[in-house]
Image: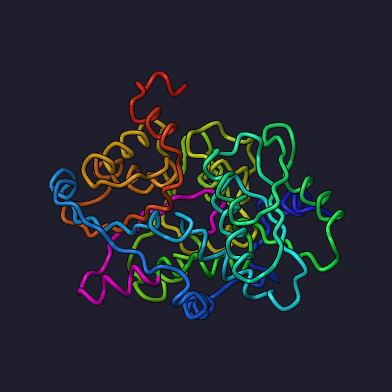
Amino acid sequence: ITLAWLHLQINIKMYDADDNLDLPSYQDVVDASKILDSVAHRTPIQTSRTLDNELGVNTFIKCENLQRMGAFKFRGGYNAVNHCKDAAKGILTYSSGNHAQAIALASKLHGIPATIIMPTDAPPLKLQATKSYGGNVIFYDRYTEKRDEVAKRVKETLPAGTVFIPPYDHKYVIAGQGTVGKEMIDDLQSESVTLDYLFVCVGGGGLISGMSLAAKALSPNTKIIGVEPEAGNDAQQSLQEGRIVHIETPRTIADGAQTQHLGILTFAIMKKHVSQMITVTDEELVDEMKFFGERMKMVVEPTGCLGLAGLRKMVKSGEVRNGSACGVVISGGNIGLKRYCELISSSHSSLH
């Protein structure tokens, strides 16, 4: 039985995804924060008067592009590896890049070998970093092969006791990602700021699931908005239809959000806590890359721009009221300079 088969079995409208699931709780997020203390960076929250004046809201940007290995994924990866460190003979995962780096680095820090399945078109910078952290990389074609099936085949060749840690549908991965939300809300509330909205990028749902656990415990009136690429709106469809919707691998510059479906755990959490799912175009992501670079002096990868692009879209539509306190998460900054320069200097028509 593969994960792909399991996901197909729950593709039924009346299925209650909460039944018999070992879902993470806010306490798991608290526990993860203790494990990550002094290991992960407590990333800063930045503001921009230019942005606030332009949008008419108060924006607070959590900079996970400044996290170890350049993305929030380190939190969940380290937490998950830490929980199995005593028994694991090796770690196996698949990822387009950021989770790959996270698992490779976390495994290295725990002294455990890691095997990483990556797509043949993975960003060169992410591939290079994964290898530099000691990950043994195996390639697959994300457009013609199903990575769950590839992972099953690869695991059969690895030593007994190898533990598979997926990119998002894992209790301790979700809990680790939730520490982004706990930190952000704790830091803002210490300055007497309560968020009205929290904009989070969505691929498989690990980040928004974990952050929503923290937000609902610490700031229950905050509306959580998920943002995904227009070309890959499986999460939006899933929440609308009440079931996990599977799509073909989306073709988008947001490589960190090229997922085909939500996870069983992430879907169960998202349907409880996420207020709304919206989509943005690749062109809008490039516009935010330019904004971050020009006005905030930060290099941000396309996926990391989803949150701000979503906020800007909802302000323009009038859905976010003037003067609102809006949290935005930059998920990562892992993009090669050549690709970065290509995107920010491109015309919108050249993206297609």
Residue, far top: 349
- Name the image colouring: rainbow
Q: How far across and how far down the image is residue 296, in percent? A: 23, 47
Placement of the N terminus among the 4 image quadrants: bottom right
- Number of marks: 0
Q: How far across and how far down the image is residue 76, in percent? A: 55, 65
Instruction: Say which of 40 and 311 sits in front.
Output: 40
- Residue at the spot 48% in from the left edge and 39% down from the top edge: 254
Residue 167 lies, with reference to residue 249, above or below; the image says below
Q: How far across and how far down the image is residue 116, in percent? A: 68, 51
Magenta residues, start to end = 182-206
Q: Is residue 188 magenta?
A: yes
- Residue at the spot 71% in from the left edge and 62% down from the top edge: 113
Residue 189 lies in quadrant: bottom left
In the image, is 184 to the left or to the right of 133? left
Residue 167 lies, with reference to residue 123, above or below; the image says below
- Residue at the spot 29% in from the left edge and 56% down from the top edge: 61
Instruction: Say which of 239 and 283 sits in front.
Output: 283
Instruction: Say which of 228 and 71 sits in front.
Output: 71
Q: Is residue 329 magenta?
A: no
Residue 254 lies, with reference to residue 153, above or below; the image says above
Residue 196 lies in quadrant: bottom left
Q: How far across and how far down the image is residue 86, in percent? A: 72, 78
In the image, is 182 to the left or to the right of 112? left
Residue 23 lies in quadrant: bottom right
